[in-house]
Image: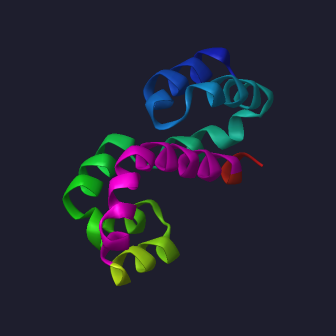
C-alpha cells in the first residue's frame, strides 16, 4: 500500500489505538495490497473518549461495556450494579484502554 495512504490512516485514526500499536499497524498496512484500502476506510472504530463519557454517566449499568462489545461484562455490571460501585470506579480508569484494545482486535481481524 502507498505510504501516503498509510500515513493518512494513522493521522486520522491514531487516537483509536494505543501508541505502541501504531508502528505495528503502519508496518502491516505498508505490506498489504491496495485492494483492502476501501474496506479499511469503511470501518468505524469506537472512540475512547466517548466510552469514558458513557462510563461516567451509565457505567453502573454496564452501558460502557455494551458499547465496546463486551456483552458478558456488561451483563455482569448490570446485574451487580457495577460491582456495588467498585467495578464502575475501576472502569473509569480502564475503559479507554479497553476501547483501544477492542479497536486493535477489529483492525487485526480485518487485516489478517
Closer to the camera, 1 or 23?
23
Q: Residue at x 42, y 80 (%)?
A: 75
Q: Position of residue 91 (x, y in %)?
A: 39, 54
Q: Name the side, left or right, on which 5 lies relative to 33.
A: left
Q: Is residue 2 above or below residue 60?
A: above
Q: Which residues are magenta?
A: 81-108
Q: Position of residue 19 (x, y in %)?
A: 56, 25
Q: Main secondary structure of the magenta part?
A: helix
Residue 24 appears in which quarter of the rendering? Answer: top right
Residue 77 appears in which quarter of the rendering? Answer: bottom left
Q: Name the side, left or right, on which 52 lies relative to 95.
A: left
- Placement of the N terminus among the 4 image quadrants: top right
Q: Residue at x 50, y 67 (%)?
A: 70
Q: Is residue 71 above or below residue 28?
A: below
Q: Is residue 85 magenta?
A: yes
Q: Residue at x 67, y 31 (%)?
A: 25
Amino acid at each position: 500500500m502507498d505510504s501516503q495512504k498509510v500515513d493518512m490512516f494513522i493521522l486520522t485514526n491514531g487516537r483509536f489505538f494505543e501508541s505502541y500499536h501504531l508502528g505495528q499497524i503502519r508496518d502491516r498496512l505498508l505490506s498489504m495490497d491496495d485492494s483492502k484500502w476501501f474496506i479499511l476506510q469503511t470501518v468505524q472504530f469506537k472512540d475512547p473518549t466517548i466510552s469514558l463519557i458513557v462510563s461516567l454517566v451509565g457505567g453502573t449499568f454496564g452501558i460502557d461495556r455494551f458499547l465496546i462489545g463486551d456483552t458478558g461484562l456488561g451483563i455482569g455490571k448490570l446485574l451487580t450494579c457495577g460491582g456495588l460501585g467498585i467495578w464502575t470506579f475501576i472502569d473509569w480508569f480502564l475503559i479507554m484502554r479497553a476501547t483501544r484494545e477492542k479497536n486493535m482486535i477489529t483492525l487485526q481481524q480485518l487485516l489478517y
